[in-house]
């Protein structure tokens, strides 16, 4: 186990940025310095290396698992597969997970994992070996388990990798009833949950919709209320970016720009998100899409085009002092973790903008992961026990109303009213309720004290207060 700092060649700004945001928000709380230090610090940092067979030889893989806070158990957080990953980044993401869970009232501590590889450089068999060996290393150090630490997908990983983790954990823990609760983001066939894949993007879309529905805030920044007709640029066409764009479009917004690492496209009259996605799937690039009126080889230029709302849903540190003054959006909705530097955020607010912070905006994934974890612990799908009962109850009510009024409903009307909720509908309902309630919690803190200044500070103040109460109630032992 190691708590050493990253090597000198690695960038160390991300965790520092998170701590800077924490320190600024902590000024608006009344907790003592020791408690604040405990909340801010990473409790456990496990850095390890392991070999795999590569061709006729060996390759050594660097990996991490960080458990930031144990104010709630288990801890929770994704595993990032990237050759750019480092200890500082994993620590920062684990800290953000702690605050994110507190903000949306999900009872987990924050955690994060990282494997320093480019998945494209490995065969499926090699990726399976890496994932299973990583899981075994976590098991050996008690860094995984349904009541200890529950991983999930992140950049570079998905349902396939979570399946390998679930199988490895279950194999190493024979007879454990809740073994599949040791990881979330699994496919439905392995007791995953409906709606998990699109949960983060749906959460981002709901967050944006809720933000622009507040007339007072929109008037201050010079926008009309509602999403209808709002022009939006999305950075990233991965899982989060694609579903963010898809649902924002369904809510009435106009997706005018899409940015990816190979470049950016723009059309002020709107882009067909699904068509762009299929074009990239078939050609390997968003460039060359027939519906685009402008193309940019430099993807960062795409962020600077005219729009009302910008959704950075790629990687951290995309919006900095170098480009913030060129951003024309009035609202930035952070679909990715840490896409805006603190200095850039300060300038954006000074210029009359509003930022929906990542700690809230992209919390849809962990919210639905929480639902999946509950499903795994209860060993029954949501809606399975009560759906038919609800339908029969609704049918009896419809029959009674028709009998009293003498008005017969059409078959379509009857089916719509009688229908019981599916697992997907229940998950989406729970996600929507969580995102709406959490936004207004944050906004109440934001409006309560003008000195707080930003929604990010308000979200952090709320998170700090909730975590502080947990630690105070737990006490210190021995």
Image (cartoon, rainbow, N blue to C red):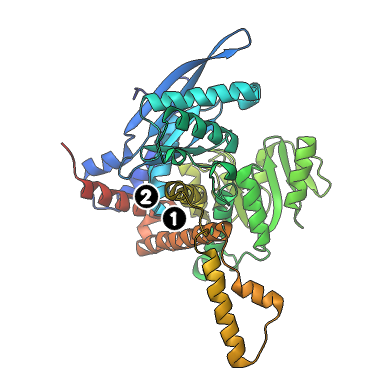
Q: Residue furthest top?
A: 56
User: Which sits earlier in the primary sequence, circle 1 or circle 2?
Assistant: 2
Do we see residue 162 in this rendering? yes
Q: Identify the residue shown where x is 60% and y is 49%.
A: 198
Q: Identify the residue shown where x is 51% and y is 32%.
A: 167
| Residue 33, position as x, y percentages in the image | 23, 43
Q: How many marks?
A: 2
Where does label 1 land, which residue? Answer: 455
**Going by the image, does 377 lie left or right of 475?**
right
Quadrant for the N terminus, please.
top left
**Going by the image, does 367 lie left or right of 31?**
right
**Going by the image, does 3 lie left or right of 247?**
left
Which of these two is toward me, 215 or 380? Answer: 380
Which of these two is toward me, 139 or 378? Answer: 378
Mark 2 Cα-neighbour bin, 10 Å: few <14, some 14–19, many ≥20: some
Which of these two is toward me, 457 or 160? Answer: 160
Which of these two is toward me, 331 or 313? Answer: 313
| Residue 288, position as x, y percentages in the image | 82, 40
| Residue 318, position as x, y percentages in the image | 57, 39
- Image height check: is 1 above or below 367? above
Report if the CB atoms under discs 1 and 2 are less than 8 Å apart.
no
Do we see residue 13 in this rendering? no
- Picture disc at residue 107: 2
SS at mark 2 in the image: loop
- Image height check: is 327 above or below 391? above
Mark 1 Cα-neighbour bin, 10 Å: few <14, some 14–19, many ≥20: many
SS at mark 1 in the image: helix
Quadrant for the C terminus, please.
top left
- Image height check: is 465 above or below 236? below
Quarter assignment of residue 136? top left
């Amino acid at each position: 186990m190691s708590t050493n700092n990253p090597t000198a060649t690695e960038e160390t700004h991300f965790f520092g940025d998170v701590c800077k945001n924490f320190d600024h928000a902590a000024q608006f709380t009344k907790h003592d310095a020791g408690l604040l230090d405990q909340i801010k610090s990473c409790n456990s940092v496990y850095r390890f290396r392991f070999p795999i067979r590569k061709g006729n030889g060996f390759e050594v893989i660097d990996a991490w698992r960080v458990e930031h806070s144990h104010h709630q158990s288990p801890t929770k957080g994704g595993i990032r597969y990237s050759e750019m990953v480092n200890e500082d980044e994993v620590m920062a993401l684990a800290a953000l997970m702690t605050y994110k869970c507190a903000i949306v009232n999900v009872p987990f501590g924050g955690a994060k994992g990282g494997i320093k590889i480019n998945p494209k450089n490995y065969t499926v068999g090699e990726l399976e070996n890496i994932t299973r060996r990583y899981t075994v290393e976590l098991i050996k150090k008690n860094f995984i388990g349904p009541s200890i630490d529950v991983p999930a997908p992140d950049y570079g990983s998905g349902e396939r990798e979570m399946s390998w983790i679930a199988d490895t954990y279950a194999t190493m823990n024979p007879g454990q009833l809740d073994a599949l609760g040791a990881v979330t983001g699994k496919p439905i066939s392995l007791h995953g949950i409906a709606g998990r894949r699109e949960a983060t993007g749906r959460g981002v879309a709901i967050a944006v919709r809720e933000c622009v529905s507040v007339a007072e805030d929109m008037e201050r920044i010079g926008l009309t209320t509602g999403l209808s007709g709002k022009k939006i640029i999305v950075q990233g066409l991965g899982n989060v970016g694609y579903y963010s764009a898809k649902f924002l479009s369904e809510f009435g917004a106009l997706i005018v720009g899409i940015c990816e690492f190979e470049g950016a496209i723009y059309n002020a009259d709107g882009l067909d998100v699904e068509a762009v996605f299929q074009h990239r799937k078939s050609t390997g690039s968003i460039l060359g899409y027939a519906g685009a009126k402008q193309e940019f080889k430099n993807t960062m230029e795409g962020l600077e085009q005219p729009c009302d709302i910008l959704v950075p849903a790629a990687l951290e540190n995309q919006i900095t002092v170098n480009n913030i003054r060129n951003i024309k959006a009035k609202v930035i909705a952070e679909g990715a973790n840490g896409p805006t530097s603190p200095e850039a955020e300060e300038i954006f607010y000074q210029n009359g903008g509003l930022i929906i912070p990542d700690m809230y905006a992209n919390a849809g994934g962990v919210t639905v992961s929480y639902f999946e974890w509950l499903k795994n612990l209860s060993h029954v799908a949501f809606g399975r026990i009560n759906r038919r009962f609800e339908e029969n109850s609704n049918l009896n009510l419809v029959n009674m109303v028709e009998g009293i009024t003498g008005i017969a409903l059409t078959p379509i009307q009857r089916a719509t009213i009688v229908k019981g909720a599916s697992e997907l509908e229940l998950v989406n309902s729970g996600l929507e309720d969580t995102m709406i309630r959490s936004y207004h919690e944050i906004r109440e803190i934001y409006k309560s004290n003008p000195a707080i200044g930003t929604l990010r500070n308000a979200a952090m103040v709320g998170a700090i207060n909730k975590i502080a109460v947990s630690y105070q109630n737990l006490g210190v032992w021995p």
